[in-house]
Image: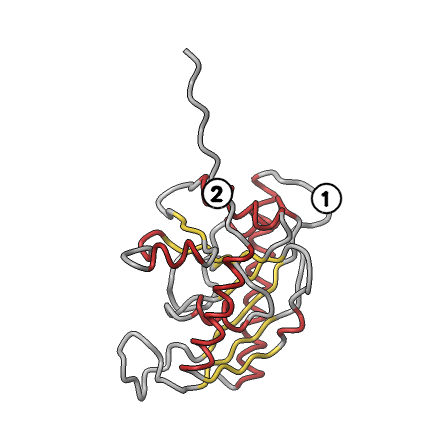
Amino acid sequence: MTPAPQAVPAVPTQRGAAVGHRIGIGLMYGLWRPRVLGAWRVPATGPVILAGNHAHALDGPMIIGTAPRPSHFLVKKEAWVGPLDPFMRATGQLKVDRSGTDRTAVTQAMSVLEHGGVLGIFPEGTRGEGEFASLRTGLAYFALRSGAPIVPVAVLGSTDRQGRLIKALPPLRSRIDVVFGDPFEAGDGSGRRTRKALDEATVRIQERLTDHLKTARHLTGR
């Protein structure tokens, strides 16, 4: 008996990401006062990976709304609840199961890059202090497989507590700094994709992201 062919996961559309980008611009600039530095560093065309620090739930929407190009972010499946599920599907975001290797999410993310799109990822894998202290290998995997440059992004000020009207959000109309860094390649130029190459690339990435975060804090005084 011939096994039934497996369904191919749908590729997130650029049109959906563009809609999400416009919504993000309206919400982020309407509710807060983003100060964006270095957006010109994001390549205008071709595949790009935005790698952000993650200390607050607002970080993803803030990057989506302030980046110069529409983006597809990997978002944990726990966030896809109620009306957020169809909304995030419609805006081109990617659901990921962090309990193991989510092959559907991996395939969709690679499709974004293969089609010259922008993939957003929080390389720490979960929300924490936003210090890039412990990186998973997912970012290195996507960068080595696709050859896409990584642009570090530091979101600063989203964790401010003073003056909050809504506990889960930064104070409305408060300033949030979003600093984009110089794009860089994760590989060492050898083209290797072995486990050792992946681990070495993760170390290089962590060093570059940590350095960018220090620079962003110096520039913004955060």
Identify the residue under disc 2: 10
Residue at 51% over, 45% down: 11
Report helix, strand or loop for mark 2: loop
How packed mark 1 is, by other alpha carbons closer than 10 Å (few <14, some 14-19, many 20 or more), is few
In the displayed orientation, state which residue is furthest to the right.
189
Q: Looking at the picture, which amino acid does disc 1 mark? A: Ser
Give the camera-side residue of 115 and 50. Answer: 115
Residue 20 in the image: x percent, y percent?
47, 64
Give the camera-side residue of 218 and 32. Answer: 32
Label 1 close to label 2 by CB (< 8 Å): no
Residue at 56% over, 65% down: 209
Mark 1 vs 2, N-terminal side: 2
Which quarter of the figure is the N terminus placed in? Answer: top left
How packed mark 2 is, by other alpha carbons closer than 10 Å (few <14, some 14-19, many 20 or more), is few
Q: Looking at the picture, which amino acid does disc 2 mark? A: Ala
Depicted 42 relative to depicted 103: above or below: below
Identify the residue under disc 1: 190
> In the figure, is residue 159 to the left or right of 25?
left
